[in-house]
Amino acid sequence: MSGEIELRNLTKRFDQTVAVDAINLKIPHGSYCCLLGPSGCGKTTILRMIAGHETPTEGDVWIGGESVVGLAPAGRGTAMMFQNYALFPHLSVLDNVAFNLKMRGVRKAERHRRARELLAQVRLDRFADRMPSQLSGGQQQRVALSRALITKPRVLLLDEPLSALDEFLRLQMRGELRRMQKELGITFVHVTHTQLEAIAVADLVVVMDQGRIEQAGSAREIYTLPVSAYVARFMGGQNVLAGKVASVAGGFATLVGDTGERFSSPLSGQTVAEGDMLHCCVRRDRVKLERDRRPPGAPPERTNAVVGAVHAIEYQGSYVKVTIDVPGREPFVANVADGRFFADPVDIGDPVLAWWAPEDVHLLTGGLGRSVRVTTFRQAGDSHG
Amino acid sequence: MTRLHHLLAAPLACLLLVFFGVPLVLVVTVSFFDFDQFDIIPTFVLTNYLELFGSSLTYSLYANTVKYAVIVWALTLVIGFTVSYFLVFHVRPFLLQLALFLVCTVPFWTSNVIRMISWIPFLGRNGIFNQSLIALGIVDQPLEFLLFSDFAVVIAYVHLFSLFMIVPIFNSMARIDPAVIEAAVDAGAGRFRVIREIVVPLSKTGIAMGSIFVVALVMGDFFVVKIMSGGQSASVVLAMSNEIAVLQYPPAAASAVVLLLVVTAMVVGILRIVDVRRELAG
Amino acid sequence: MHRPGSGRRPWTFYALAAFFGLYVLFLYGPMSAIFILSFQGPTGGLTFPMNGVSLHWFGALFGQQRTGDFAGSFTRSILLAVIVLSITVAASVMAGLAFRRRFLGSTLVFYMAIFSLIIPGLLLGLGVGLMFQFLGIKPAWYSSALGAQLTWTLPFGLLIMFAVFSRFNPFYEEAARDLGAGYGQTLWNVVLPILLPGIIAVALFGFTLSYDEFPRTLIPIGSRNTLPLEIWAMTTNVTSPALYALGTLTTAVSFVVIAVALTSIALIQRRRTRRGTRTDAGD
């Protein structure tokens, strides 16, 4: 049976608030999909509608080519792993895993045998007779996984599966999840609010905001080629810049910022017109930094550069994160390789010039409606955009 | 879904309706009925109420009962707050806290009548308390006011009803996040400032619940007054029970209705100050 | 405040501990006095000193001399308490399930329960008595008195279920449904077992509140007394330590019931949380 999931115009309203707003999404069979977004963006609601714990207000959920709206959770071929695992506290590990078989009337010996098999797969067979509260967080998670998998689902739904674990276990378990998904070959839908978790495990990352999908694509696409300022900011690793298109020529667009900086960006097939208000972004690790020896306050003469004073310096091991206060803009970040930084270390308050190559700029043509938001980052005196 | 919920709530709702709702309506109805030596006469009269309000005895009964209620409320509040405060904020580990809390609640599950009469050998003229005082040379004559007096009534009330204050206040206090207290201490609040500014406001649901219980219980009591005052004092319900004993149901019902209104007014007054339901639901 | 790690306890700790100690003494002191006095010698009186130690007064309870129908009222009380317990548990658990969502009339039922709790007991008894009189049914311990006691135990049951459900994580039910359990299966295999400690608490309240109930039962009891009413009658006409013996016996029964209930709750909790951390937090 195919674990392809298709959401068609899926909408969920609670009283007056719209939790999920007319979502369309196709998740291929056997893929690992992450629904990513801040809390309250509707990602968990989508998961619960796929599972059947929530009924859509409008729209449809298709799994394996048929609509499952109206079917009981257990009749959908899905299994869910709950945020805090929801392991039954009154049942032993073995009985937790065997629960589904018991509900289906499988004899005790048989269901225990199969539960033990599954527990052995996650190396927990020797804990079979323990109670859930006697297990560590990581072990509980594996029990929850076994309990879900005993139903032989075509789709496994995971609600913040790693949030209850400490940092070390989280890294270990996310690798484990990815490995299991490959082995089982079924569809995983994993809800998280952690960007790094999503891009580490997913084939398909779906970035959400306010009940809508901002962007769906591979991890690399989402990270390097965000479609909107929202995605760029949310994923991190990018500096978002705003400007008005001054000219379009030779496959490049030139934007002029409020304070006169000029940014040049490859069009990469996107169509923009002169006069458009646009965002573009530049990756933090592509930014070069040098001391600004010109009189303070002068705008940069070159294209694709900003000037400002160093606001914060954070050593990150392989690189140094330098945050620059650019007058009239949101803070600008340069991730400087540690060798290069320490060759001529700048200090907090030093005036610097940050610049980058035009090829490293990416235009954000999606989510144009959100440019209004940019004003919130500007200083009060400059908010005329 | 709501149909299922109605179905599930139906047994409790019906039982309460039949054994609380209907009887309540009957009491109100009968309070307007006439009566003779043998029977209730179903005609509408106001004589029961007129006699009730025309009698100075009614007012002195209420004065006496309210006096008990206020004294007992104040004492149980002090005890309830202090005991809960000690258990919640001073007793560790959790299991010891739970054990001591249970020590306070176990008597709740035993007979009130027995607990009340257990004061008789204790407070009596030749009781343990007097004997100890004499043995210690504090007094040379037994104290007479200990038993069969207002003092004995109040002692028994506090003994029986202080649990109703401790349990809700303990529950409220146990839900206070210790970090809130620590934050107040960090902000420079002394021990008593913390109690006044943090603990009391955050325990007010429990205080209100306990107050409702204690006030309602004292206002509705008759057996403690009867036994512990040795017949020297009376309460509203004790007078009512005497009427019932001679089968004068209509005046007893009128008295009951007035009492119910008074108690309801007191409870509503408490609820005015603290919205218990909102905090119960949360 | 008790500051962890500060080593020495503040003076308030000792003051409060002393207060608590005195309160416990106040709570149990007089009770223990009558327990001791119930073993009074045959010639002893209602107060100390003890004139020897004997089981004479316990014997007097079972003899037919002056102490009324002890065995009969005791049996009735236990039976009634078991019936009240059963109805209270069933109705409260069902209502607890219902009250997890607001439904039409939920506020009315809630206020009815609260007022049923605080209404003066004798008044309620009067109402129930009147109802049976108007219906022409003879009041009896298993009908009118049962109903009157339920008005006392059901509100407690409901309030306990509120507390129990406020800590119940609804994800358990979703997980069960996800794993193929129907509504009934979820209830039977997941919800009720998880709530078992709370249900036992409701049962404890149902039993003990009924077993000791007196003001509500007094009027609608009919011709045959329950134990508390028998004791009530004795307080006015029995002036021997037999009264204390009865008090000791009935309290011992209460203690046994309390011990059984609390021990079973403790055992269930221990089974679930032997070592390890608690994971069933609702948040």
Image (cartoon, rainbow, N blue to C red):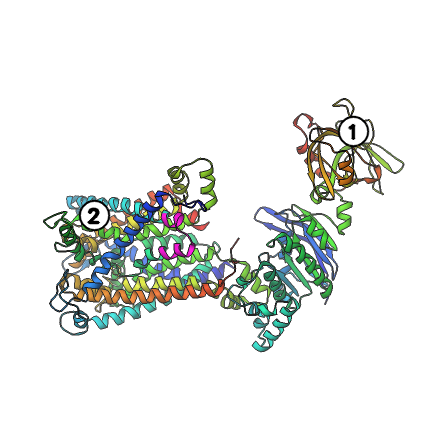
Residue B197 visible in the snapshot: yes
Secondary structure of the magenta portion, mostly?
helix
Query: In the structure shown, which secondary structural element does the residue marked by tag 2 occupy?
Result: helix
Q: Is residue B88 magenta?
A: yes
Side of C209 relative to A15 (left or right)? left
For the N terminus of chain C, the quadrant is: top left
- The mark closer to the camera, 2 or 1, is 1
Q: Which amino acid type is shown beneath numbered disc 1?
A: Glu
**Image mark 1: chain:** A
Identified at 46% across, 59% down, the residue is: C98
Residue labelled with disc 2: B49
Q: Tell me the crowding category of disc 1: few under 14, some 14 to 19, or many 20 or more residues within 10 angstroms, Cα based.
A: some
Q: Position of residue C136 (x, y in %)?
A: 25, 66
Residue labelled with disc 1: A261
Mark 2 → mark 1, Cα distance in angstroms: 90 Å
Nearest the eye: C159 or A304: A304
Side of B132 relative to A307 (left or right)? left
**Image mark 2: chain:** B
Nearest the eye: A19 or B107: B107
Q: What range is drawn magenta here?
A: B86-100
Q: Which amino acid type is shown beneath numbered disc 2?
A: Tyr
Identified at 37% across, 41% down, the residue is: B273
